[in-house]
Image: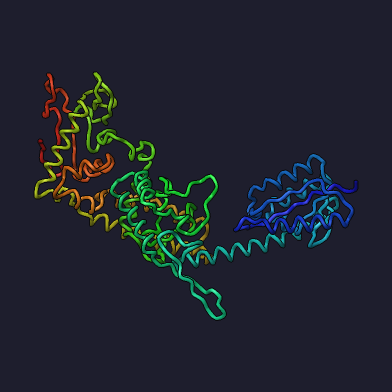
Amino acid sequence: MGERVAIYARISEDVLGLEKGVERQLREANELVKARGWTVVAEYADNDISALHGAYRPKYQAMLEAAELDKIDRIVAYQLARLWRNRRERAEAIELLSHRRVSITLIKGTDLDLTTPMGRSFAAQLGEADTLESELKSERVASAALERAQAGQASGHVLYGWERINEFGRGGKRIGFKDVLHAAHAEIVKEIVERALAKESLSRIAADLNDRKVAPPRLAAGLESRPGRPDTWSTSSVRSIAMRWANCGRRVHHRDREDEQLLPAEWPAIVSEEQQIELRTFLGDPSRRTSRSGARQHYLTFAPDIARCGKCKGKLRVVRKRGHPTYVCQDNGCTGRRQAWVDDLVERVVIKRLSRPDARDLFRRDDSGAAQAREEIRVIEGKLLQLADDHDADLITREQFHRSTARHRARLVELEKDAQKMMIGVPATLVAELVGSDIEERWHALEPAQRRALLAAMGFELELVYGARGGPGFKPESVRITFRDNSVAGP
């Protein structure tokens, strides 16, 4: 039977998923094994997986398990770099294979007898050269990526909302590109942001885009459909578009990493930075995800900033009492009023208040504090960028870099919260549409989340009065309503 051979093949990157590099390695390995008179007992191939940072390679691990179980005598690979790029992984494998008396043959190389000290040393030295090559390449790639980020250039494919204009030099070689607004797609992005800011549910936005036959990003880019995944707008795709910093002309470098940076982008913005910050804060609110506020039908429940129990100041919830949905104190049951009566009173009071000439005054808030917070945010972002440059130039230690970065990022979180608190929370377009004519019709057309946002922006506060006189029917005086200007409202 001869030596039992396991063939291993791997390539780090296979953008198109064609596996041609792996197929070539397997073919040449089989030709070598046949010429040597050995027997192939197994083939292992990991496609599109880098070995530099010790990423999990399922087929590689299966091959080592076969060696551990004494099922193979030799491994044939195209180059040693196909087996190892990582120092720790290489040392562990050499130890295992030498113990199990498994040797290595390289198609573009030599035979490595791992049962001898010289063979193991030679494998380690060859492998170290591969590791050095990979690390230098990784360093060059990282440096180029940082340079592109600092220049505000896009990384990867063009995003939905823009189109790419390529620049060519002599001989037709591409020497650069520029991303400009795609008129139709940019309008869709702007629409998504503005509707989400108006507290319209993402599922409703997605459904409307699908009803209008608006092509989703993948189809708009001319890409093929994916098996098992409908090419339509979904809540997640709408949210993904809405949350992008790219919308306001900002570029993220090292996303979700410790050294993440938010930098100016060279492509034109679709919406303002203030809009994007407000929307990201709203959509990223953990309480919104857990409470399903976009789907909630009772806009006065679980919102102590606009509606609460008059005794314990707790949140309200809706339960059925005597066959009717009723607002009650969530924690203690101190108070309770029939939902239909309370909602009717709220709508009549709000519509009446919005009909007054001074209605817009309720929405006016001093945003100078927000502007100051945003300016400090820009200053800190500049400091973070300078820290990264100083660290790259070895002007500060790694410990100094991480300590300073952590302090600045903590301050950024505080400033982002301060800026959001000082913002109105609803877009000016929604206020403009609601204040004026047809107020009642416009109010009823709003979703619960939109109504709740407007009430909060108006400084609306409702209390179920504790100890109010009972009796048949609804007593409006058992519900106290006030607005930001401290006026007590009545129907």
Q: Is residue 379 visible?
A: no
Image position, residue 294 (x, y; %):
33, 40
Left or right of residue 296: residue 24: right
Question: Tell me, what colour scheme is on the image?
Answer: rainbow
- Relative depth, front residue between 373 and 365: 365
Tell me what residue is drawn at x 68 percent, y 58 percent: 20
Q: Is residue 166 above or below residue 88?
A: below
Residue 450, position as x, y percentages in the image: 26, 43
Picture layout, residue 377 above or below residue 324: below
Give residue 317's quadrant in the image: top left
Image location of residue 42, percent across then percent down: 78, 46
Residue 392 appears in the rendering: yes
Q: Nearer the viewer, residue 479 or 220?
A: 220
Horizontally, residue 37 falls left or right of residue 333, namely right
The picture places residue 311, in percent across and down from the top left corner, at 20, 27
Q: Is residue 168 above or below residue 245?
A: below
Q: What number of labels is visible?
A: 0
Q: Give the quadrant of the C terminus.
A: top left
Please give the name of the residue rendered at 60% of the width and 62% of the height, measured from the top-left corner: 138
> Quadrant of residue 483 in the image?
top left
Decide: is 477 above or below 229: above
Closer to the camera, 189 or 260? Answer: 189
Residue 158 left/right relative to 204? right
Find residue 267 and report its image quarter.
bottom left
